[in-house]
Image (cartoon, coloured by chain):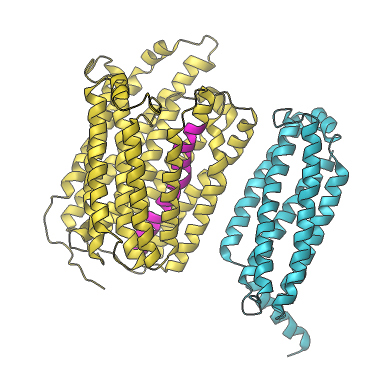
């Protein structure tokens, strides 16, 4: 057996195993479906009100959106590092990575709260216009997912600190990681769709 | 039956069936009142008959759920029920309170009943489905708490399975959301807003968990499929039910004074609500196809498959029909709603309770399954009730489409009562379908009294 084919077969075995608990994947698919339908409805509604959407889109804070994108991506990277370290058998060393991921996620929440405060201060609400209804609904549903994700990361951090994870016990950390990447993924569609695309 | 304390389920199931018969009697009376307006007037006016019809439905389903819990929780937990005595005491309290309430509706007029039962202290009466006097509502809470205590303690001291956790989650949710029936703000919009927290979050939220758990329990028993497989399906179903159903409440908030964004939230999330019901259909058929044993109780398998199909049609398809805000703009509160209500309640909750009764009743009576003859009669009753319910739904849907057209869409809209005259024919057809349903129900009750050689109980 050449080294290449050996690594290939190793790749195949890892590819076949579902990372994390099956239940979280059902949950993720259900979440993606709900967000997906919301995005499609947004697209169709925008097509009927292009001018309104374009005009009000300009009032959104793209800088804070971009900062939040960087924060979530970095956070996801830290989670990946935590999973890798845990899989290598160093559960306790995964804890700082998870703490860093938590900090980035918390940063997202802070930036978002400032953004919301600014919008609410300007008198914008769910009833202001169809565009703002979509902007607030979609970002708020996502915001709630970030908060749930932070709770999950905190639990993972606690687990890592007590040395719970390792090559034989990856279920908990992988399950949480899969959820967090979903939160990240949704934002990567949401941000360009609502803030940028014209 | 593996544990003797499971036998407390028996009186609950018998009471459920008895009240079911009462519900259908009042349903027929009302169906007649639609076409012969003064039938039974002034003794039992339409509004009273309707109240009895809907309240009996809810009460007998609750008896069914409680009976199901008393049957399946000990078996899942692999231990005797925490307190069979408490369960029996609660049975009698609930039955007597329920009967007294119905008699109250029938014997005194509603305003007097309200006065007699302390509605002036805390006004909770007068709202659809939540018409019960304050005393009855308090009684329901006490019975529910004692019941939850009893089954939670049973689960805590025994094995904790996914089925029993989902069942308990649903039952706790049922009790918690019922508390909103005590909140009755003077503002009509707020009143309706929270009213749906009981009604919607029951039938399109926590009851779906109860239903999925009951179906999963029966499917494990009659198919012998691995618990692991069934539990994964349960995860899918409850996730989908909660993701879609909670915010899906918004589809009741169209044009009742709530902010406009509910039209978007309600439409989008409730449009996804058929998915968990479809998952339940696929689940039921998939498990039966992969069965590892031929269970002697064929009737129970039929009821379980029927639940899957009819719940999807009634709750899923007929619900989706009028759930999008632009459609609901025309159909709101029409006979389309009545059509959906009938098939959804029958397909989802009536059938799931009859499924567990069909499975558990022979075991409670000391045999694995009823005799072939009894099962054939029982299956006849399934087809009679199910097919007639399909026709009730179709006639009401036809009536609804015509009603919406004449009253709301046409260039020369007609007033409500004139439209009712125009759709009279469909009400007659619905009534006859209802008579067939009643025949099916009599057939069902008869099946319990048919003797014959039954399958002996082999205790594993």
Instruction: Give the magenta part as a residue range.
Output: B194-221
Residue furthest bottom in the image: A1
In the figure, B208 relative to B40: above or below? below
In the figure, A74 relative to B266: above or below? below
Instruction: Determine the residue positioned at 70% across, 47% down.
Output: A142
User: What colour has chain B?
Assistant: yellow
Residue furthest right in the image: A63
Residue B336, position in %: x, y?
Answer: 44, 28
Residue B257, position in %: x, y?
Answer: 57, 23
Give left or right: position of B169 versus B53: right
As rendered, which of A14 and B242 lies closer to the eye? B242
- Which of the 4 image quarters holds residue A154? bottom right
Give left or right: position of A6 versus A192: left
Is residue B429 visible in the rendered image? The answer is no
Residue B6, position in %: x, y?
Answer: 26, 60
Give left or right: position of B234 versus B72: right
As for residue B203 lying within the magenta part, the answer is: yes
In the figure, A99 relative to A124: above or below? below
Is the N terminus of chain B in the top left, top right, bottom left or bottom right quadrant? bottom left
Residue A144, position in %: x, y?
Answer: 67, 48
User: What colour has chain A?
Assistant: cyan
Q: Main secondary structure of the magenta part?
A: helix
As for residue B245 lying within the magenta part, the answer is: no
Is the C terminus of chain B in the top left, top right, bottom left or bottom right quadrant? bottom left
């Amino acid at each position: 057996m050449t080294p290449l084919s050996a690594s290939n077969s190793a790749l195949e075995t890892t590819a076949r195993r579902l990372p994390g608990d099956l239940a979280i994947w059902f949950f993720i698919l259900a979440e993606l479906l709900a967000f997906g339908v919301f995005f499609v409805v947004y697209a169709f509604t925008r097509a009927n009100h292009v001018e309104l959407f374009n005009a009000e889109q300009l009032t959104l804070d793209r800088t804070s959106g971009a900062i939040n994108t960087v924060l979530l991506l970095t956070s996801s990277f830290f989670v990946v590092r935590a999973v890798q370290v845990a899989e290598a058998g160093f559960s306790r060393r995964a804890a700082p990575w998870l703490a860093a991921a938590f900090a980035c996620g918390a940063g997202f929440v802070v930036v978002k709260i400032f953004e919301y405060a600014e919008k609410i201060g300007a008198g914008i609400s769910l009833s202001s216009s169809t565009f703002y209804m979509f902007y607030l609904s979609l970002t708020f549903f996502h915001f709630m997912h970030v908060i749930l994700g932070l709770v999950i990361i905190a639990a993972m951090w606690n687990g890592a600190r007590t040395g719970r994870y390792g090559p034989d016990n990856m279920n908990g950390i992988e399950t949480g990681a899969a959820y967090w990447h979903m939160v990240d993924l949704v934002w990567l569609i949401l941000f360009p769709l609502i803030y940028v695309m014209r | 039956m593996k544990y003797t304390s499971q036998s407390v389920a028996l009186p609950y199931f018998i009471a459920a069936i008895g009240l079911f018969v009462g519900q259908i009697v009042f349903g027929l009376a009302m169906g007649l009142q639609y076409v012969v307006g003064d039938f039974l007037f002034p003794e039992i006016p339409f509004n009273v008959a309707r109240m009895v019809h809907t309240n009996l439905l809810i009460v007998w389903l609750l008896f069914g759920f409680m009976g199901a819990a008393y049957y399946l929780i000990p078996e899942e937990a692999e231990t005797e029920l925490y307190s069979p005595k408490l369960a029996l005491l609660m049975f009698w309290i609930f039955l007597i309170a329920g009967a007294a309430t119905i008699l109250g509706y029938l014997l005194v007029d509603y305003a007097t009943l309200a006065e007699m039962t302390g509605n002036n202290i805390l006004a909770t009466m007068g709202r659809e489905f939540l018409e019960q006097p304050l005393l009855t509502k308090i009684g329901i809470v006490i019975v529910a708490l004692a019941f939850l205590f009893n089954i939670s303690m049973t689960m805590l001291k025994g094995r904790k399975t996914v089925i029993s956790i989902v069942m308990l989650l649903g039952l706790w949710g049922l009790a918690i959301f019922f508390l909103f029936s005590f909140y009755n703000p003077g503002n009509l919009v707020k009143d309706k807003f929270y009213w749906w927290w009981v009604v919607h979050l029951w039938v399109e939220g926590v009851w779906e968990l109860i239903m999925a758990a009951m179906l999963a329990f029966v499917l494990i028993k009659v198919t012998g499929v691995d618990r692991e497989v069934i539990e994964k399906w349960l995860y899918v179903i409850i996730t989908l039910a909660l993701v879609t159903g909670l915010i899906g409440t918004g589809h009741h908030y169209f044009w009742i004074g709530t902010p406009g964004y509910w039209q978007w939230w309600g439409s989008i999330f409730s449009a996804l609500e058929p998915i968990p019901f479809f998952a339940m259909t696929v689940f039921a058929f998939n498990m039966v196809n992969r069965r590892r044993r031929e269970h002697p109780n064929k009737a129970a398998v039929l009821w379980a498959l029927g639940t899957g199909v009819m719940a999807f049609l009634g709750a899923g398809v007929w619900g989706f029909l009028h759930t999008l805000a632009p459609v609901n703009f025309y159909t709101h509160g029409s006979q389309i709603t009545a059509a959906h209500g009938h098939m959804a309640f029958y397909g989802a909750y009536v059938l799931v309770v009859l499924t567990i009764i069909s499975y558990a009743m022979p075991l409670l009576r000391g045999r694995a399954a009823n005799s072939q003859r009894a099962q054939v009669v029982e299956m006849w009753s399934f087809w009679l009730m199910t097919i007639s319910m399909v026709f009730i739904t179709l006639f009401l849907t036809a009536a609804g489409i015509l009603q919406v057209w004449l009253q709301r869409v046409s260039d020369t809209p007609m007033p409500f009562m004139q439209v009712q005259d125009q759709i009279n024919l469909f009400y007659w057809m619905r009534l006859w379908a209802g008579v067939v349903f009643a025949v099916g129900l009599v057939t069902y009750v008869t099946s319990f009294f048919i003797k014959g050689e039954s399958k002996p109980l082999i205790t594993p």
